[in-house]
Image (cartoon, grey):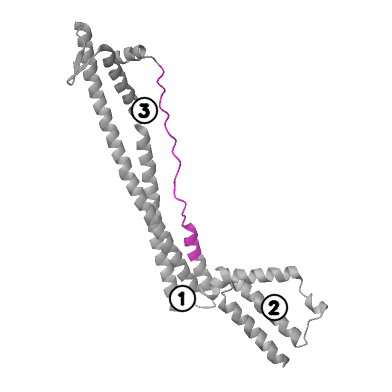
Amino acid sequence: MKKIAVVAIVACVSMFALVYGCTPESRHEVIERASNAADALNGADKSAEHEHATPLIVQKQQKQEIIRQNTEWTAENQALHPIEYCQAQLQKLDDYAKKLKVAAHKLAVEESRMQRSIEDNSAQITALKSFLEKAKSKYKEAETAGNWPMELNGFKLSREVAQEKIIEADTKLQLLTAQETKPQNDLASLKKRQTAVAQEQARIVATKEKVQRTINDLRTKQVMEGEKGIIDALKALNDELAALSSDADNPELTDIMTPDETSDRETRFNDIMKQ
């Protein structure tokens, strides 16, 4: 009857662990407790001396090592299951390749935006220079002839308003000119990142080919099982994988400070007219 009870207990505990989806380490603990209970029912309860033959700290480390071997591609697991290890690395490479593809698309979109911004900035600078040249000429003519308000592009402007518009245009021109190099520097930095991503994508393709060749060699026994050849092949493969880096060159760009406008209208206007 005791044996029947023991079998029933072990079966129930095992079924509980399987049905409720315990983690590998928790299932191991459940089974171990069930085994201890079975020993106790069978009258095979361990003595205190035997129970503490293996120190608890050692038992803990042993459990951790079991978990590590079950959850990581350790050197032992790589050597015992080289094909499965290579297949796992192929999956990682595929995931990395997808991330790089997304990054490359974002960089391309940003490049287009930056290029358009540079072109718009250049067009505004050209327009402002043309306006200032014409406005200054018209102002000098009106000032010499004492003919106010002056006419500019179909508008009648008083002396004060003309001065304000010329100052406003020059201020905007100076601001755009000061900021002209920033988008160009941003674009240069972005192109470097694009180059880095493209190089990494090419390296992923080459590495995937190497992994696949290693799998083929293992399957055709060109790399012999149990021989040093497997270890050497995996070491070479791991060196290739370690060379890949997901750390894209993404430096933070320093914003260019624009000059403060602190001069009054007349002083600022006179400086512009002297140009």
Q: In the image, residue 98 lies at what x, y percent?
A: 39, 59
Which residue in the structure is indicated by mark 1? Answer: 218
Q: Position of residue 215 (x, y in %)?
A: 44, 73
Q: Residue at 66% across / 74% down in the picture?
A: 29
What type is the residue that disc 2 sits on? Arg
Q: Position of residue 128 (x, y in %)?
A: 26, 25
Q: Residue at x 75, y 70 (%)?
A: 56
Closer to the camera: disc 2 or disc 3? 2
Q: How crowded is mark 3: few (under 14 residues within 10 Å), some or many (20 or more)?
A: some
Q: Can residue 163 be seen in this view?
A: yes
Give the mark nearer the N terminus: 2 vs 1: 2
What segment carries the magenta color? 236-262
- Quarter of the image that includes the N terminus: bottom right
Q: How many angstroms separate mark 2 from mark 1 (CA)?
A: 41 Å
Magenta stretch, main secondary structure, is loop
Residue marked by disc 2: 33
